[in-house]
Amino acid sequence: MGGAYDAVVIGAGSTGVTTAYYLAREGFRVLVIDRRGVVQGMTAYSLGLVRSYYANEDVARMSHYSHGFFMNFERNFGVNVFTRTGLLVIGNDEDDMRRTFEVLRGIGTNARLLSSNEIREMLNADVASNEVGIYEEDAGYADTSLYTNTIMNRARELGVEFIIDEAQVQVEGDGVAGVRLVSNGGIIRANHYVVATNVWIQKTLPQLNLPIRNIIERVVRVDVGRSLPNVFDYVNNFYIRPEGTNGGLMGLLYPPEDTWTDPDTFNPLAEPEFDYAVNLMERAARRFPWFVNVKYLGGWRGLYDVTPDWMPIIDEPIKDLIIVAGLSGHGFKLAPAFALMVTELIKYGRMRTFRDIFRLIRFKEGRMVKGTVQEKAAF
Ligand SMILES: Cc1cc2nc3c(=O)[nH]c(=O)nc-3n(C[C@H](O)[C@H](O)[C@H](O)COP(=O)(O)OP(=O)(O)OC[C@H]3O[C@@H](n4cnc5c(N)ncnc54)[C@H](O)[C@@H]3O)c2cc1C
């Protein structure tokens, strides 16, 4: 089915916008449609952690590639969106940590294995003798809105068009007949369609009955009064991400899996429950004795679009329709890798740079994409 565009991308969050930019760089004619505007979905509430650290080698390679995109962002786009803070991961399964460390070293990440003493010194923390750390020096966080808007501006310079409207995918037979704009009923046709609607994916494509549920993630803001690296503490189940010089954003690495089906009725501005914040801060106080002086400043909530293995779905379930969904709470940093994968699928009909392991069929065949102990690779 030929169309006015080579590709229509639905969703203007980090995934859709980065994909549109990659496609435009290859000379494709691209239209992006978003019902609210640029960065109006979960990208806006993301913590924007960027790192190569993943236990699964395929995902670590994708993350390492994307990390490079963020590290070189200022040089390529003239805007600094990335703050380098380092990331310290603390665990007590030494074999597992060593395996992950070998994966990271194998792909060229700037990481070191730390003893309990070294962690203690680095963070002024309580550390048991059986605990070890992986420190990734170049990790940090990005301003997710500035990133997405900057990419969108560059994409538009390359000819990408943008419409604010609600898009309905028109499936006919075994293909896509076009995308219908809700405001005026107009039909837009393209050679390829990319759906990147994240927690709205079940509303965009209900007929696919995807194995994705939306779960709530709470973010707690604190004033820590000191600068910290990003910390993932798998022993006490919490993370903290620096915010500016003295601030911190915290959450659970393994959040309670309470679901929220309809993202349109979800209020991201609601503060986390008080008990939740107290529990989280108690966890952090077990690691950092000085945490008793930390001030609670409120917070917000977001939704994760979670798959059974907490890994994304990148697939073409209907001819010429590619979905990038089920990002499971860690899809921001991987946006450049997703964009490359989709662009290769459209350009060459197959992925070339990364392995094609995120198809839906894996759930039916029981071939989950796993890491080592930290299988839920949150953030
Ligand atoms: C609290 C929180 C913290 C996170 N922290 C991190 C982190 O530290 N690092 C990390 O890598 N990831 C993190 N994530 C995950 C990451 O932010 C997301 O995976 C990623 O931003 C999703 O981007 P997206 O473009 O796929 O979706 P979104 O940003 O949600 O964009 C989807 C867009 O689709 C549009 N849309 C929906 N339906 C339609 C329709 N029918 N027609 C037109 N438009 C439509 C919406 O308006 C929306 O703008 C976090 C997520 C949350 C919630």
Image (cartoon, rainbow, N blue to C red):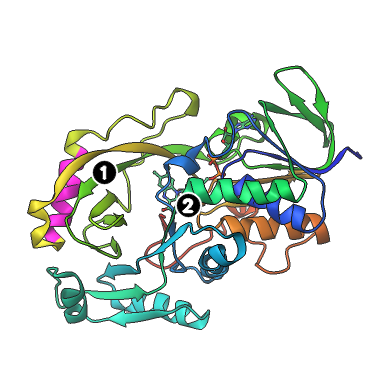
Name the image quarter holding residue 301.
top left
* Helix, strand or loop for disc 2: loop
Q: Residue at x 30, y 57 (%)?
A: 242
Nearer-the-camera pick, 198 or 357: 198
Residues at marks 2 and 1 touching, judged by CB atoms closer than 8 Å: no
User: Which quadrant, please, contains the N terminus?
Assistant: top right
Q: Is residue 26 left or right of residue 256?
A: right
Of callouts 2 and 1, the N-terminal one:
1
Which residue bears the numbered disc 1?
220
Nearer-the-camera pick, 197 or 145: 145
Q: Is residue 92 left or right of residue 328?
A: left
Residue 366 screen position, x and y as percent: 56, 55
Q: Residue at x 31, y 68 (%)?
A: 89
Q: Which residues are magenta?
A: 276-286
Residue lying furthest right: 2
Amino acid type assigned to the residue bearing label 1 in the image: Val
Nearer-the-camera pick, 180 or 99: 180
Q: Residue at x 48, y 29 (%)?
A: 263
User: Would you say residue 262 is visible in this rendering?
Assistant: no
Q: Number of marks in the image?
A: 2
Q: Is residue 237 left or right of residue 105?
A: left
Nearer-the-camera pick, 224 or 360: 224
Label 2, label 1: how far apart the Cα atoms are? 22 Å
* Helix, strand or loop for disc 1: strand
User: Would you say residue 209 is visible in this rendering?
Assistant: yes
Residue 340 screen position, x and y as percent: 68, 60
Q: Is residue 66 magenta?
A: no
Question: Dominant secondary structure of the magenta stretch?
Answer: helix
Residue lying furthest top: 184
Which residue bears the numbered disc 2?
310
User: Which quadrant, please, contains the C terminus?
Assistant: bottom left
Residue 172 screen position, x and y as percent: 83, 29
